[in-house]
Amino acid sequence: MNAFWAWIKGQRENIQTILIAIFLAFFIRTFVAEARYIPSESMLPTLIGSQDPWQSDRIIVEKLTYDFSKPQRTNVIVFVPPACFQDNAGSTSVTDTSVAYIKRIIGLPGDRIEVQGGTVRLGSTVLDHERFRVQLFERTAGLSSEFNGFTERPLAYQKRLKLEKDGVQFGDQKLSTAEIAQKFGLTPDQVTITPGVVLINNKALDESYTYEDPSYNMKDLSDIPCYQGQKTGPVIVPEGHYFAMGDNRNNSQDSHIWGFLPAHACPKEQSVIDSILANTGIAPCTGLIGKAAFRFFPLNRLGTI
């Protein structure tokens, strides 16, 4: 026993160093910054995600900024999603950071939000974003005229489709309006492309950072699944809340699914959270973790976000 305490005494400086390092690591991760990897494709092309941490981007989440300033439009944030979505996913705690999400802030308090899905007019037929995706895949892949969309639909959905006024981005191809017309046996003047947009106070956002333009419409609170049967009226961001969306517009569980994102911290008692949610229909907190600040892996994508 004496030998043990003598060894401890001899290692005092090393033990102190280890304890200080553990304390600093805990303090920094809790209050200053932490590393996270991106597990999904909802933020493409800004951030590459994968269930395999070694195949996804890794980022530093900085936690001090929002202690001194409010989140701004286009900030990329990391947070615990509102309770409505978590309940659908089977989670019961809105403070569980294992289910943290990363999205971009689109709407600020007081903003009126509207989403208009993209369409393509081919002659006298107007196709929505997803129907056009399947039909363009049919023409590009050279499938038979009997193609009905069901068998090959999953393959079509693997192709990126971003509508632009002068053409489309389809997979790794950029097709002009004239090239699209040729594929469908039409003339260029018979093709009209109307990209999907997000409107803030009736003004379309310029979103060069998105992977696809929206394929869905959202004009009313009843268009948001978590508010259906509870709320109607224009989608106006309440005070103390934000509207957050993934850059991969059509493959993102975000505010167009679970609604407004509360900005303030969670009450500690789950019963308080449940009571506020039951009375207002809006989750009282999100457990905001911080701002996505820097990508440190892979090295060829090193840089700020």
Image: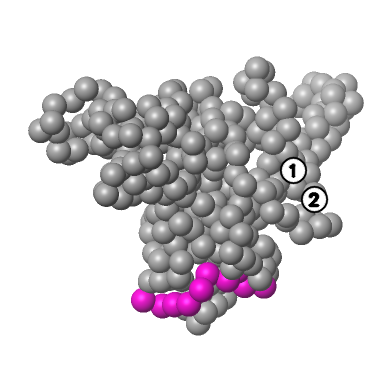
Please tell me which residue is depicted at 26% across the width and 36% down the height of the picture: 135
Q: Marks 1 and 2: in contact by CB < 8 Å?
A: yes
Please tell me which residue is depicted at 34% across the width and 41% down the height of the picture: 190
Does residue 6 appear left or right of residue 136 in this picture?
Answer: right
Q: Quadrant of residue 141?
A: top left
Question: In the displayed structure, would residue 222 be above or below residue 243?
Answer: below
- Of residue 45 and residue 131, the one placed in the foreground of this image is 131
Does residue 219 appear left or right of residue 244 in this picture?
Answer: left
- Of residue 219 and residue 85, the one placed in the foreground of this image is 219
Q: Position of residue 8 (x, y in %)?
A: 82, 26
Q: Position of residue 120 (x, y in %)?
A: 36, 45
> Which residue is labeled 2 in the image?
65
Residue 72 part of the magenta-drawn span: no
Q: Which residues are magenta?
A: 229-239
Residue 62, label in figure = 1
Please tell me which residue is depicted at 66% across the width and 33% down the height of the picture: 59
Amino acid marked by disc 1: Glu
Amino acid marked by disc 2: Thr
- Considering the image in quadrants, where does the N terminus appear? top right
Q: Position of residue 10 (x, y in %)?
A: 88, 21
Residue 231 part of the magenta-drawn span: yes
- Of residue 159 and residue 3, the one placed in the foreground of this image is 159
